Image (cartoon, coloured by chain):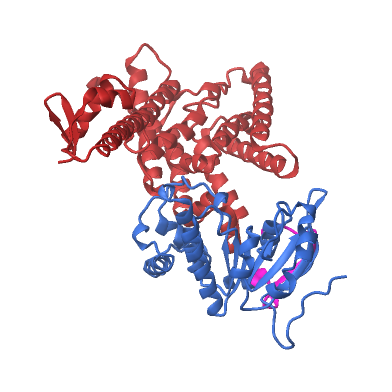
Chain colours: A red, B blue
Amino acid sequence: MFDLLLDPTLRIVALGSAALGIVSGGLGAFAVLRKQSLLGDAISHAALPGIALAFMLTGSKHPLVLVLGAAAAGWIGTLIVMAITRSTYLKEDTALGLVLSVFFGAGLVLLTFIQHRPDAAQAGLDRYLFGQAATQLARDVAIVAGLGIAAYAITFLFWKEFKLLSFDREFGASVGISMRFVDVVLTTVLVIAVVVGLQTVGVVLMAAMIVAPAAAARQWTNRLGTMVALSAGFGALAGVAGSVLSATGANLPTGPMIVLCLTAIALLSLLLAPARGLVWSFVRHKRSQRVLRVEATLLDLYAMARQHADPGHAHASGALRALGGGGAAATWRARCAGSRGVVSRVSRRVTAGR
Amino acid sequence: MIPPAELPAGSQAAIEVNDLTVAYRDRPVLWDIDVVVPPGVLMAIVGPNGAGKTTLIKAVLGLVRPAAGDVTIFGAPYEEQRRLVGYVPQRGSVDWDFPTTVLDVVMMGRYGALGWFRRPGRAEREAAMQALEHVGMPELSGRQISQLSGGQQQRVFLARALVQDAAIYLMDEPFQGVDARTEHAIVALLQELRGQGKTVVVVHHDLQSVPEYFDWVMLLNVRRIALGPVSEVFTEENLRLTYGGKLPFLTGV
């Protein structure tokens, strides 16, 4: 294990994956809050032809060139989604599905074309499909970090505007902040958050890096700032954990391992987060159900007490069972009420009151 | 056919809408509307579902692009006067599960005045707290907004409009989904605003309460049916024109 941590290759991979997790996780929070989770998927798939075209036009495989191509294509894909939604009767999910598959198909055609060219048979661009974290170089990590810092700087600058756009777009427009412009800026940030991960995680799985950390983070907090920070933290954690796990195991692929780690984090958050977790809401539900039943039993006791001049009159537990229709449960509930000191037992009978 | 409501000579309209037509695709939602709202009135816009009430408000705010017509606020286009206008959208238009607090939402009313990039600070916080006290919920300032009741959500939106410190308020169904007590509190607030000389325009659904709450009324059903003081234009005849045969009860009008 310690040998692994000292391994320089793994250090680069883990560092790169952590940086990627911080960028895509934190910024993905806005996509989730705007109910545009699928936009991340559309952007990443739309990026594929951009990567291929960038290579065909420049002949370079420098990651910065390819990332810029990916960003341009992802951006154009998003614009097309917006245009379709605005000018046709199609809903956003349909537009996303269309753009995603058309761009992805075009990307696959271009990739195959490139691979069949004699001069570039070993282009290796197909690693952008499923990602290949293990081949990361320090240069690649620097690109992720550089673009990430730029995207976070924009987010910091536009924090109030992003919040307004995400929460109440029309009110924002009414007070004179151009929501269309803010939308363009936020989309650009999201495009950056997606394309930085394509080399590591790949086109197909990148959406998980955008959606899962934010979905997990939302479970733990009710503050936007905390949510973005937590989301970035979860992304980083999964990045490191996934890299280490893939290095320990028998050649497990890094990208999918990162995504699986994220899934685990999201699953645990959905189940265990205190206020919104499923487990706790189940416990709360059961508890309130019990309180309500005990109160129903107390009402039964009250009804019986009213039939006697003496409010302290003791009633047979059998009568209580018949009223509550619950067999032994009624006596048990009377005992629950007893533990609150409002019901006492007189030999085998129960009485309400002091 | 119906003469536009005239202002007394020498006074300027708070809101003036001329020949406004708005269409969604081919279907006209508002047709050739003229509106003159004098300053200092508390006006209801009533009409059946789909009459274009919300669209009219959004057109005044520049949120929907009209096919024809123009809007002026105190004689100038909305873009130049937006500081004078406060907006209360429909409560259901936002996601109340958004991770933010009551105070944070109320401070959004200052964002327009703050302008690009400047963060809300102490002054904005104080204004927001004042507005929350005004709507009777200062103790909830730190509350996550998903934990509010319908009436509280509505009052948060009202507080957000109050910190806009506007001269004209446009409100889209501020009574929707609130209990009777909150409704009376909101009406008192609206009448207080009018008392300060502000103009308040409210999309309203309950015809019964129009004469009690409002002094002006606009009856709208794609076209403008009538506009003027409640005592003059809120008549059975006009209501029949607005709602067609579908008006179930008209007692007390």
Q: Is A233 situated above or below B58?
A: above
Farthest bottom residue in view: B10
- Viewer-side residue, A340 vs B19: A340
- Viewer-side residue, A222 vs A121: A222
Residue B177, position as x, y percentages in the image: 53, 52
Residue A5 makes an appearance in the image: no
Farthest left residue in view: A347
Task: Please provide the residue range marked out in magenta.
Answer: B63-80
Residue A349 makes an appearance in the image: yes
Q: Is B164 situated above or below A146?
A: below
Residue A41, position as x, y percentages in the image: 56, 31
Asked whether, in this view, residue B100 is left or right of residue B242, the answer is left
Residue A267, position as x, y percentages in the image: 39, 26
Residue A210, position as x, y percentages in the image: 48, 35
Where the C terminus of chain A falls, by quadrant? top left
User: Which residue appears at 64% of the width and 18% of the height?
Assistant: A115
User: Which residue appears at 88% of the width and 70% of the height?
Assistant: B1
Asked whether, in this view, residue B3 is left or right of residue A176, the answer is right
Residue B5 sits inside the magenta stretch: no
Q: How many labels, in total?
A: 0
User: Which residue appears at 55% of the width and 72% of the height?
Assistant: B166
